[in-house]
Image: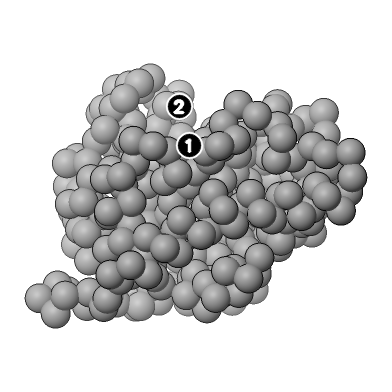
Amino acid sequence: MLVDHHCHLDFPDFAPELDQVVSRARDAGVATLVTISTRIRKFDEVKAVAERFKDVYCSVGTHPHNAHEELDIPLDEIIALSKHPKVVAIGEAGLDYHYKNSTPAAQAEGFRRHIAAARETGLPLEIHTRDADDDTIAILEDEHAKGPFPAVLHCFTGGRELAMRALDLGLYVSFSGVITFKNSEALREIARDVPLDRVLVETDAPFLAPIPFRGSETSRRSSSGQRRRSLRRKVFHLTILRPLRRIISSGFTARPNDRTPFRPLSAGLPQHELSMHNIGLRLVGWGAAHWNELGRM
């Protein structure tokens, strides 16, 4: 089973053919998609997409670009919205110092609030971090000291220190099409050192198409349905799965003994009986169990 744990199906890019987009994902072997919230005040739009398709779920949260717009939304409201049966994650939230659409202070406040929501609900937090490694590490470690919370560094493009410190806190690391870019060798080196059972993949669609399909629709349009499905599987295998499998298998070993052992995500977290909420933890743990299966695509 392939899970795209981070995409944006509510974005206008997909509106004209959303049914076809989801159908093409199924044809390519993607069994579950999680469409990610970027504004809580637009959560109804994200939720509507998740409710429309059986195999699509969603998150609830505020992107750091929009943090300054939603600081008045209290923690209790985020938690309440997360109880919807289709919500399997919190966020995306975090720090983005590349564009700084929101001030660092506003982003940090929103980030901490979303961490609190993840801690309270037990749902994994989708963390967006760009050009903010030091502050991200500081907030993660400070908040972790208050109590553990499940999380994933989505579309990871940070440095080695951030990846390793996050792993020590029990987080997951997710790679996107960026890992195929020519100038991403440093990122591929980091991927080699991430334990296989902590690796996720995502599209972050409609962004970050992998090489050689950036700016091209070749991988998703074809006159023949069978050819289209075959091409899509081949594209995903060649541009994301095979490179990632090669990166991790070349020299991948267990983590060094001098590093803190991983703690199960469930340790110290609230127990929830909401069955659909539990899928959130499954989504971020599929990697090792299905890696060989993915290689046969």
Q: Residue at x 34, y 35 (%)?
A: 183
Q: Residue at x 66, y 54 (%)?
A: 234
Query: Would you name the residue on which mark 1 appears?
Result: 62
Q: Residues at badges 1 and 2 in contact (C-beta under 8 Å)? A: yes
Q: How is the image coloured?
A: one colour
Q: Amino acid at mark 2?
A: Asn
Q: Amino acid at mark 1?
A: Thr
Question: In this orientation, which residue lies closer to the viewer: 179 or 119?
Answer: 179
Q: In the rendered image, is residue 139 in sight?
A: no
In the rendered structure, the answer to whether residue 146 lies left or right of residue 276 reads: left
Q: Relative to 226, say whether 287 is above or below.
A: below
Q: Mark 1 packing: few (<14 Cα in 10 Å), some, or many (20+)? A: many
Q: Relative to 106, say whether 57 is above or below.
A: below
- Residue 240 at x, y = what percent? 52, 52
Quadrant occupied by the C terminus: bottom right
Q: Mark 2 packing: few (<14 Cα in 10 Å), some, or many (20+)? A: many
Question: In this orientation, which residue lies closer to the viewer: 5 or 257?
Answer: 257
Q: Residue furthest left?
A: 258
Q: Residue at x 42, y 63 (%)?
A: 246
Q: Residue furthest right?
A: 224
Query: Would you name the residue on which mark 2 appears?
Result: 66
Image quarter of residue 206 = top right
- Residue 137 at x, y = what percent? 20, 48
Label 2: state its secondary structure.
helix
Count of all numbered marks drawn on residues in the image: 2
- Residue 252 at x, y = what percent? 30, 71
Label 1: state its secondary structure.
loop
Question: In this orientation, which residue lies closer to the viewer: 86 or 186?
Answer: 186
Q: In the rendered image, is residue 16 in sight?
A: yes
Q: Label 1 vs label 2: CA separation?
A: 6 Å
